[in-house]
Image: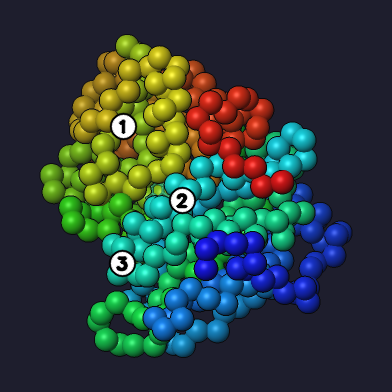
């Protein structure tokens, strides 16, 4: 298997929903509610290696109830998007970064990694099969969810033997809408997301599961999202449950917490840091304490803050609340630097601006 075009064999008999039904679903897709007609699947067994690649009907999976993924959360995933281009084509954005990150996530969870070429081919084959599902309205995209899980039945607490790689796709409107409605964050100072030596840098299902109580708490407090502090001192800002965070200062500098095993290395984070440097901003990857954030927001030293990730791209933060904190940022409005960075990234992703870093991966 060397990633040739024949690895994922398309099932020509897989049903497609009628045009009218698809159009209706694409009009207001929301996020993660509507799924396309197909999925990509690929199997691994120790004796055969990776095999049986298919583009087949998106349908419920048949899994043994004792499958490693179900019993011990031996499952990692990715989140990426296919974007419509102005000429009617479509592109992925830095897809090799997702392929490599899934390999690192897999290694952390004792999972057999998918070779980069097969990951990319699975994603590309699926988008080509479901090309009519790429929404074309402003800000919308086709969200792609590759995932990889242990399928062999076992109660033994050791890595599994058999794996399944799967890619599903879901048309998505921008989840947080425009930058006109900034997020309100709830500081999770009792529940943590990641500890040194833990799984915080892996995109694994278990990390998300473990964040949901904090998300629920944030909701009860009238906030949109939870923001997590470090597990050791409960002092350093880390990230949201599914997005990284960045801070903008009056002196024109941009700061974000450094990667160090407890923070998920976002592709959006990395891209924005590069674009910020291109714009001449001073970029610092340095720890930032929660008390300092409050002090700087109140003094005006800090002017903007935003969360970032593939799904929402850039989401400004307007309010922050917790048991010991309460402050507003930039008068609760989206800031200029946030807006500039967001626009710069989106214009590249959608093929409307030059792509000096070679990030855009045209599919057709
Ligand atoms: C996926 C994810 C991000 C964002 O990563 P992107 O590659 O930018 O989408 C940030 N934090 C967590 C915890 C994540 O799971």
| Spatial separation of the CA atoms under disc 1 and disc 2 | 21 Å
**Disc 3 versus disc 1: nearer the observer:** 3
Element type where label 2 sits in the image = helix
Sequence-earlier tag: 1 or 2: 2
Q: How is the image coloured?
A: rainbow
Position in image of residue 319 (x %, y %): 39, 32
Residue 232 vertical placement versus 345 (above, below): below
* Image coordinates for residue 126, horizontal then vertical, percent: 65, 61
Q: CA distance from mark 2 to mark 3?
A: 16 Å
Place residue 113 in its image quadrant: bottom left
Category of crowding for the residue at label 1, using alpha-carbon neighbours closer than 10 angstroms: few (below 14), some (14–19), many (at least 20):
many
* Sequence-first disc among 3 and 1: 3
Q: Residues within 10 Å of mark 3 (few under 14, many from 20)?
A: many
Q: In x, y percent, where is residue 263?
A: 29, 46
Q: Secondary structure at mark 3?
A: loop
Lower position in the chain sequence, tag 2 or tag 3? 2
Q: Secondary structure at mark 1?
A: strand
Does mark 2 have its CB less than 8 Å from ligand 1? yes
At 17% from the left and 52% from the top, the residue drawn is: 196
Q: Looking at the image, is mark 1 or mark 2 nearer the viewer?
A: 2
Would residue 5 be seen by someone viewing this image from the given angle?
yes
Residue pointed to by mark 1: 256
- Where is residue 341 shown, x and y percent of the image? 49, 25
Tell me: 333 left or right of 68. Answer: right
Task: Provide the residue designation for mark 2.
Answer: 98
Mark 3 sits on what residue?
109
Looking at the image, which residue sits at the far left? 233
């Amino acid at each position: 298997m060397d990633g040739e075009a024949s690895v994922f064999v398309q099932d020509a008999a897989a049903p497609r929903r009628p045009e009218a039904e698809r159009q209706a679903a694409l009009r207001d897709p929301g996020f993660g509610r509507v799924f396309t007609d197909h999925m990509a699947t690929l199997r691994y067994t120790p004796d055969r290696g990776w095999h049986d690649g298919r583009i087949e009907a998106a349908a419920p999976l048949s899994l043994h109830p004792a499958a490693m993924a179900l019993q011990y959360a031996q499952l990692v995933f990715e989140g990426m998007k296919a974007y419509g281009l102005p000429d009617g084509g479509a592109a992925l954005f830095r897809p090799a970064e997702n392929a490599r990150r899934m390999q690192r996530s897999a290694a952390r969870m004792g999972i057999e990694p998918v070779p980069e070429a097969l990951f990319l081919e699975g994603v590309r084959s699926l988008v080509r099969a479901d090309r009519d599902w790429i929404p074309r309205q402003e800000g919308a995209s086709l969200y792609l969810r590759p995932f990889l899980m242990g399928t062999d039945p076992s109660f033994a607490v050791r890595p599994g033997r058999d794996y399944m790689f799967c890619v599903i796709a879901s048309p998505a409107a921008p989840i947080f809408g425009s930058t006109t409605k900034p997020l309100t964050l709830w500081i999770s100072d009792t529940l943590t997301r990641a500890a040194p030596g833990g799984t915080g840098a892996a995109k694994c299902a278990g990390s998300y599961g473990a964040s949901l109580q904090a998300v629920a708490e944030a909701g009860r407090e009238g906030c949109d999202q939870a923001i997590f502090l470090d597990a050791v001192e409960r002092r350093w800002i880390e990230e949201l449950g599914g997005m990284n965070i960045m801070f903008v200062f009056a002196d024109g500098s941009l700061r974000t917490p450094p990667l160090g095993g407890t923070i998920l290395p976002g592709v959006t984070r990395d891209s924005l840091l590069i674009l910020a440097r291109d714009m001449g901003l001073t970029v610092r990857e340095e720890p930032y304490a929660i008390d300092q954030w409050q002090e700087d927001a109140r003094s005006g030293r800090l002017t903007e803050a935003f969360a970032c990730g593939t799904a929402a791209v850039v989401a400004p933060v307007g309010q922050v609340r917790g048991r010991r904190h309460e402050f507003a940022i930039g008068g609760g409005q989206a800031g200029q630097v946030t807006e500039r960075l967001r626009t710069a990234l989106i214009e590249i992703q959608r093929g409307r601006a030059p792509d000096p870093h070679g990030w855009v991966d045209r599919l057709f």
